[in-house]
Image: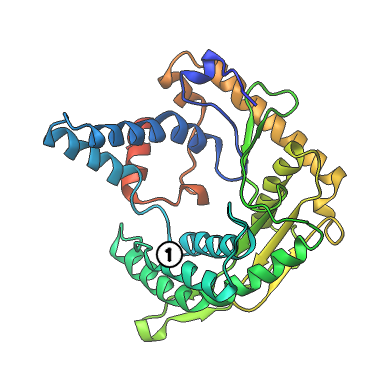
Amino acid sequence: MLHDTPDWAVQYNYFHHSNPRSKDRAKNIFEKMHVRPKINAAWEVIKDTKATDEAKGLARSVIRCLSDNRANAAMKAGVAVQTACDLHLVPDEFDITLSLPEAILAGVDEYKGHKVKADTPNNKDIDSKKKEKYLEELPLVIEHAVMGLKEAMQTDNRILGEIDLLDTLPGNALPHNTKPDYGRRGDLKTKWSGLTRGGTPEQDKWRKAPLPSSLTGMFDMNNVFQVAGFWALNGHQPPFLVYASAHDYRVFTPENTPELRDDYLQDIVDQISMHHKTTENILRAASDRETLLGLVSPDFQKLCWNEPELYLAEARRVWGIN
């Protein structure tokens, strides 16, 4: 569906909303208005055969500042698990899927390409250890993810992979954008062992990744908000969440989880719509970038701002924070 974006949103490169629990409003606006346009412009310079070496060097420094070292070992491991599950469960254009062992090998190969998050020596050390550990866990996490997804979609005639859902929620001018991983209604979440640092590398200890027993926790509620977006845009198909670790898996559906039932989801969609409406009012009220930045304030203590120092330095510069 095509959507006409109002001028008050176009001027800030703000074309759609997303899960409001994934990041705070300040970061969402910062990424849309500042980060993405700068990265896109930098790539255009790099691809321009007429650009000078100096211009390309400056463009690469922008990409290093705003793009490099942002994905950690757990994030990339989760992506690799989904890749393997897709290859095994989702038929390609020739109606072919890989065997589970073949899919696991493909996932492991993809994950081996993860560049360790090396923005600081400490982060490099931690992420390197986690990459090594998660390479060991990856085959088991994939197996459990496949088991959970098959259980969640056991009545589906054909398993569908990730798609885009884009439409306006009630009371909003801009569309909500979301991407269900499977079946137009469900998402896969992976859990990985945690690292407790000791006084020496030999004293480091690994903690078994726990699976949630309910969806009432803060981080799991973020996922409920995510699937509420699916539910709002896919004709109210019953959602599911599959959690997988190296030790087990757990499937949450409306049958076993109050937070995935229609009445609860409707309340969440109403909250999401209200949040989006507030964002739209802020965009309308702002006459220029400086005014917009003055209407939202970043809380760098929030988890969503756990970014490399170069990225944070750029955010502080944009907001004029020393």
Residue nearer the viewer, 306 or 53: 53
The residue depicted at 60 percent of the width and 27 percent of the height is: 279
How did the renderer colour the structure? rainbow
Q: Quadrant of residue 120?
A: bottom left
Work out which quarter of the rendered image holds the C terminus and state it.
top left
180 lies left or right of 292? right
Q: Check the image and name the residue furthest to the left.
A: 53
Q: Quadrant of residue 44?
A: top left
Task: Label 1, secondary structure: give it.
Answer: helix
227 lies left or right of 113? right
How far across and how far down the image is residue 131, in percent? 41, 71
The residue depicted at 51 percent of the width and 25 percent of the height is: 295
Q: Residues within 10 Å of mark 1 (few under 14, many from 20)?
A: some
321 lies left or right of 205? left
The answer to whether residue 207 shows anywhere in this view is: yes
Please tell me whether residue 156 is drawn above or below residue 66 in the rendered image. Answer: below
How far across and how far down the image is residue 315, in percent? 38, 37
How far across and how far down the image is residue 164, in percent? 61, 40
Q: Quadrant of residue 197?
A: bottom left
Q: Amino acid at mark 1?
A: Glu
Work out which quarter of the rendered image holds the N terminus and state it.
top right
Q: Check the image and name the residue furthest to the bottom.
A: 202
The answer to whether residue 200 shows anywhere in this view is: no
Please tell me whether residue 196 is drawn above or below residue 123 in the rendered image. Answer: below
How far across and how far down the image is residue 24, in percent? 55, 40
The residue depicted at 28 percent of the width and 46 percent of the height is: 64
Circle 1 residue? 110
